[in-house]
Structures are given as C-alpha cells and as structure tokens.
Image (cartoon, rainbow, N blue to C red):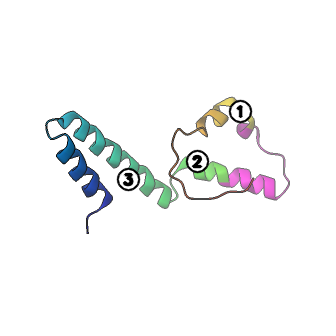
C-alpha cells in the first residue's frame, strides 16, 4: 500500500514530468508538514501548550492571562489551512 506522500509524488510526476520545481516544492511542503505533525504528537507544538493554559484558566474560572488578549496571539491563531483534528470547546 502506498503512503500519501508516494501517491502525491506519483501523481505530480505523471501529470507534470518535466516540472521538477513543483515536485521539489511539494516534497519540501510534505517534509515541513510531517515535522510539525511529529512535534504536535510529541507535545512540542507551542500552540497546544498555550491552548491548554487558556482552557485551564477558563475551566477554573480564572482571569485569562493578558497574552491571550494580545493582537499577536489572535493573529497567530488565524490559519489559512488547519489539519488539526482536536476539537476544543471554549
């Protein structure tokens, strides 16, 4: 059975065999995605730590720390594409 990466690689190669630039960019994107996914699985993704702190404050009815009210934090949470499957109620 082929991995997702192998399927994508095969499709890109068969559709555009002369375009190595697109293939290199696809490989780079897949590598970056895998790396970040592994970080998240191992609890090393900063956004999950911050989310946990925010949820704990809300759950315990504590004052939400100022970092969560900052414009930079709000901007950091705006994703063009999210592959997270973790559901959170706030």
Segment tinted magenta in the rendering: 52-68
Q: Using a 10 Å C-alpha cutoff, classify the residue at mark 3 as few (fewer than 14 neighbours), some (14 to 19) or many (20 or more).
A: few
Give above or below for 6 relative to 12. below
Q: Say whether disc 2 or disc 1 marks the residue closer to the N-terminus.
A: 2
Q: Which residue is mark 2?
A: 47
Furthest residue in direction bottom, as rendered: 1
CB-based contact (under 8 Å), mark 2 and mark 3: no
Label 1's element?
loop
Furthest residue in direction front, as rendered: 15
Q: Relative to the observer, which residue lies in front, 53 or 77?
A: 77
Q: Residue at x 75, y 57 (%)?
A: 56
Q: Which residue is mark 1?
A: 70
Q: Residue at x 27, y 45 (%)?
A: 27
CB-based contact (under 8 Å), mark 3 and mark 1: no
Q: Residue at x 34, y 43 (%)?
A: 29
Q: Relative to the observer, which residue lies in front, 48 or 90?
A: 90
Which is closer to the viewer, label 3 or label 1? Answer: 3
Q: Say whether disc 2 or disc 3 marks the residue closer to the N-terminus.
A: 3
Quick check: is 35 in the magenta stretch?
Answer: no
Q: Quadrant of residue 69?
A: top right
* Residue 41 screen position, x and y as percent: 48, 60
Q: Quadrant of residue 60?
A: bottom right
Q: Residue at x 64, y 48 (%)?
A: 50
Q: Main secondary structure of the magenta part?
A: helix
In the rendered structure, the answer to whether residue 25 lies left or right of residue 86 reads left
Label 2's element?
helix
Furthest residue in direction top, as rendered: 71
Q: Which residue is mark 3?
A: 34
* Residue 44 screen position, x and y as percent: 50, 54
């Amino acid at each position: 059975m082929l991995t997702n990466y192998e399927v994508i690689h095969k499709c890109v190669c068969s559709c555009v065999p002369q375009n190595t630039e697109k293939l290199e960019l696809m490989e780079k994107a897949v590598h970056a995605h895998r790396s970040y996914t592994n970080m998240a699985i191992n609890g090393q993704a900063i956004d999950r730590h911050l989310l946990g702190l925010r949820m704990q404050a809300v759950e315990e009815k504590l004052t939400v720390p100022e970092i969560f009210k900052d414009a930079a934090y709000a901007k950091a949470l705006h994703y063009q594409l999210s592959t997270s499957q973790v559901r959170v109620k706030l």
